[in-house]
Image (cartoon, rainbow, N blue to C red):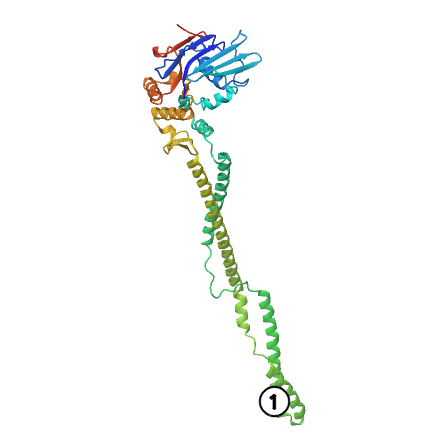
Amino acid sequence: MTKIIRLATTNYKRVSAAEIVPDPDGNLVIVAGKNGQGKTSMLDSITAALGGVNAKTTPKPIRDGEERAEIVLETEELIVTRRFTASGSTLTVKSIDGAVYPKGQAKLDDLLGKLSLDPLAFTQQSDRDQLATVLDLVDLPFDLDKLAAERKDIFERRSDANRKVKELTARATEYIAKPADLPDEEVSVSALIAEYRDGQTLNHNIDVARTACDGWAEKVERLKRELADAEIQLEIAQKRTDTAPPKVDLDAIQAKIDGAETVNAAVRLHKAGEKVRAELTIVQQEAAELSEAIAEIDKQKADGLAAANFPIEGLGFDETGVTYQGIPFKQSSGAEQLRVSLAMAIALNPKLRVIRIADGSLLDADNLALVEAVAREHDFQVWIEMVGDGDGRGIIIEDGTVRA
């Protein structure tokens, strides 16, 4: 555990030559001054010394008109020297007793933690940016974007299934249960007509046979002389009569023909209802399975959040942004947001006990006192940049150097 006890910056960005030795009994280091005088460069030199710079973030680390720059940062345990020339930068890391660390940056990386978290700036971020900041600090056991996309896809599919359930449920009520006397298939009117015509032919033949039988019987009586022939004809006609089936009930067939379309409409209606009810069952099952899939994704997310190592207890997030103690972070008071953000920064920097606040001019007297109280409570050093004179407590940077 260590804090900064001396920071000497030469020709870095807007700083020409400035040295800050923080009060060992204080917890705030207020770096103040007018805009464009080098106070931001002075605080940037802390990050540059410990983490280095690159051409993208700092294309011109050396002050205009100079050939080299140097930052010497001393903590209670280390002396860090970062030098810049046109060809690049070099780093030397020594212990207080003068021993040089051969892998200096690795030593600093172990010490640095998440120095870049500015607690005040965090409270000013939008919900989306706050969420991105927190997610960048937490190792989740799943790909949040992939999980959200998968949930969105299943949710849309379930919504579609539920719409179908509602539609089919409404349609299913239009169909009554199948009557007991309703046949399974539609009646064939052509078959009934053919049956009717066959019956007509058969009945006609039967009528003809009976007429012939009666005629031959009378002829037997009248014409004895033709008895032998008549008896033969009688016998023939009698056989035809005896072997004939019962006469077809043509009226019953006609009644079936007349009612065939009504029956067929009822059959079609019943089959349509059965089809809708079957489809309804399938879609209801699909909706239930999709609901289970969404519940599983929600459980996976909840389990992942429960297992995630957030910087402070009670911190979390949902679809809208960062939460604290289960409520949106933005709904907390300004003081509570600042306190939580400070606690995050403290939790993220257990070794180098240094926090930077880049826009300290936004802090009123109460919040500045809150920052100082939290820093004192946790034995942290907070470097604050302010426009102006820092309420008389600031180290004033003027034209790239510390004003006496």
Q: How many marks?
A: 1
Q: Position of residue 127 (x, y in %)?
A: 42, 28
159, above or below 262, in the image:
above
Residue 40 visible in the snapshot: no
Residue at point 56%, 75% (across, down): 248
Q: Position of residue 279 (x, y in %)?
A: 50, 52
In the image, 238 versus 116, the foreground residue is: 116
Residue 210, by quadrant, is: bottom right
- Secondary structure, mark 1, is helix
Q: Position of residue 36 (x, y in %)?
A: 45, 10
Residue carrying label 1: 218
* Quadrant where the image shows the C terminus: top left
Residue at point 51%, 15% (across, down): 92
In the image, 351 versus 115, the foreground residue is: 351
* Quadrant where the image shows the N terminus: top left
Outermost residue to the bottom? 225
Q: Position of residue 268 (x, y in %)?
A: 52, 59
Residue type of the residue flagged with mark 1:
Glu
Residue 96, by quadrant, is: top left
Residue 153 visible in the snapshot: yes
In the image, 146 versus 190, the foreground residue is: 146
300, above or below 250, in the image:
above
Classify mark 1: residues with Cα within 10 Å, few (<14), some (14-19) or many (20+).
Answer: few
315, above or below 399, in the image:
below
In the image, 394 versus 183, the foreground residue is: 394
